[in-house]
Amino acid sequence: MLAWLLACFSLAAPGGTVPAPGPPNPDWAASAKMLSINGNAFDTAQVAGKVVLVVNVASKCGFTPQYDGLERLWKSYGERGLVVLGAPCNQFGGQEPGKGEEIVSFCKINYGVTFPLLDKQDVKGANASPLYKWLEASPAGAGSAVKWNFEKFLISRDGRVVGRWRSGTAPDDADLVGAIERELAVK
């Protein structure tokens, strides 16, 4: 039991380092077949050529207050090309039981969230969404399944997964913010 808890809350990327990113994949968003929180096709123009931070989110998790920091990142770096993309998931302790409208309402009322949210999806296992299968299969994903809510994957402007941070990494963590700033500097 203790080993499982330590694995779930590990702060480091798998292996403790971020491996070299894979090849560019500028069409990653289209191939991921994403849906918006309202169930419609996600407008991939929102992320094309942008630096994207994908986070699996939940409304009833101990890490839920990270919504505040994610919104600050979105507001601070959005004009420079960062998109924070929330992917609600109910696979970890049933901590995202709501439907799309409930999730949007909760996020806006409690955390002022304005960044885009995807439709609720599985992020691990046989039914994982195409997005999460791709993220996990990347060099930064290291083939390792998402262990808990609020794991973060950073995608470069040219569609490479360049970093991964576990749930305990706050949105204002110096390593995460530094990686975002480095990617935003690349044109």
Image (cartoon, helix red, strand yellow):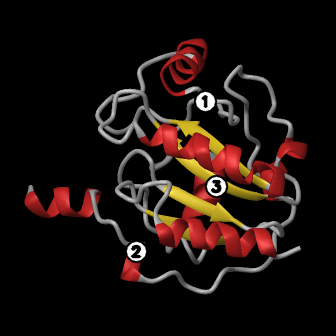
Instruction: Using residue 6 as the reference point, say whether residue 158 is left or right of it.
Output: right
Which is nearer the N-term, disc 3 or disc 2? 2
- What is the crowding at mark 1: few (fewer than 14 residues within 10 Å), some, or many (at least 20)? many
Residue behind mark 3: 53
Say what secondary structure mark 2 lies in: helix
Give amino acid for label 2: Pro
Label 3 neighbour load within 10 Å: few <14, some 14-19, many 20+: many
Q: Residue at x 48, y 21 (%)?
A: 110
Question: In the rendered image, which quarter contains the C terminus?
Answer: bottom right
Q: Which numbered tag is attached to residue 14?
A: 2
Residue 38 position in % (x across, y down): 71, 20
Secondary structure state at the residue bearing disc 3: strand
Where residue 111 appears, as percent x and y from the top left, is 51, 28
Q: Is residue 36 above or below residue 71?
A: above
Which residue is at the front of the view, 32 or 66?
66
The disc labelled 3 sits on which kind of residue? Leu
x, y percent for residue 166: 40, 61
Q: Secondary structure at mark 1?
A: loop
Question: Which circle, 1 or 2, is nearer the viewer?
Answer: 1
Per the model, the C-alpha gap separating discs 1 and 2 is 29 Å
- Mark-to-mark CA distance, 3 and 2: 18 Å
